[in-house]
Each structure stands twice: as structure tokens, then as C-alpha cells.
Amino acid sequence: MNISDLDNGTGAGKGPGDIDENVSAELARLRDSIDNIDAAVVHMLAERFKCTQQVGHLKARHQLPPADPGREASQIARLRQLAENAKLDPAFAEKLLTFIIAEVIRHHETIAAGEEQ
């Protein structure tokens, strides 16, 4: 169904500018929830990167490599299982974590090179 299929009870379809007040209110409520979740995701990612920055500094001090393929593989497997349990596409969760891991490694490489972030 698209917005032009909505019916105002008269059998006549509504145009995009004539959304039912209840539908509009529900849409606004849901979008507010989405906005709040997005904000939480950004804040959680910021906290995660604060932790991974500390890991990067620890690795640099002890001449450890920026990447840890074993840890990355176990994290991906763990996240795929969490996603499956949460009814989220595990492939999507893996893509997201792979993107985050690549950014973390880039940060660790920068720290190891002495180009503080």
C-alpha cells in the first residue's frame, strides 16, 4: 500500500497532503522513536570508539599489530549470533561490524604511526 491508497472512509483515496490525522500522529511518534534510537546508536558508537582508541594506544605502546584477525573473526561470529537472536539479518550485522572494525584498524594504524587522534 502506498500513501495514495489511503481511504478516508468515503471510498475516495487521499492525496499525499491529506494524510489522516491519526496516521500522521502515529507516523510522527514512530519517527521520534527512530530519531531517539539513532541518537543512542551514535552515542554508543562514540563510546565504543573511545574504548578502541585506548586499545590502540595499548597496542602501540607494546608494539602489537593494529589488526587481530582471530579477535575479529570471533567478534563477527558473536555478532552474527546476537543478530540472529534479535531477528536482525546476520549478514547485515556482519557488514556493519566489518565496517566498524576497518575504521578501528585505521585508527590503530594512525596511533601506531604516532599520528595521534
Image (tube, rainbow, N blue to C red):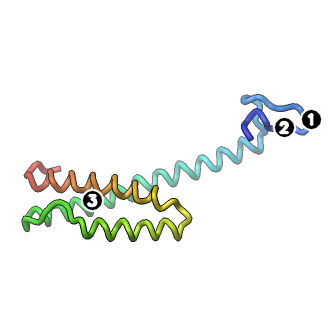
Q: Which mark is residue 10?
A: 1
Locate residue 9, reporting x and y percent. 90, 39
Q: Mark 2 packing: few (<14 Cα in 10 Å), some, or many (20+)?
A: some
Q: Of the two numbered discs 1 and 3 on the same chain, state the one appearing first in sequence.
A: 1
Q: Are marks 3 and 2 in contact (CB under 8 Å)?
A: no
SS at mark 3 in the image: helix
Three-letter code, disc 3: Lys
Q: Nearer the viewer, residue 50 or 88?
A: 88
Q: Nearer the viewer, residue 37 or 84?
A: 84
Q: Are marks 1 and 3 in contact (CB under 8 Å)?
A: no
Closer to the camera: disc 1 or disc 3? Answer: 1
Q: Mark 1 packing: few (<14 Cα in 10 Å), some, or many (20+)?
A: few
Q: Is residue 39 left or right of residue 103?
A: right
Locate residue 5, reporting x and y percent. 79, 36
Residue at 25% across, 56% down: 104
Q: Are marks 2 and 1 in contact (CB under 8 Å)?
A: yes
Locate residue 109, reporting x and y percent. 15, 53
Q: Is residue 12 left or right of residue 95?
A: right
Q: Of the two numbered discs 3 and 2 on the same chain, state the one appearing first in sequence.
A: 2
SS at mark 1 in the image: loop
Residue 23: quarter of image? top right
Three-letter code, disc 2: Asp
Q: Which mark is residue 50?
A: 3
Residue occupied by mark 2: 7
Closer to the camera: disc 3 or disc 2? Answer: 2
Three-letter code, disc 1: Thr
How far apart marks 3 and 2 lie (CA) works out to: 50 Å
Residue 4: quarter of image? top right
SS at mark 2 in the image: loop
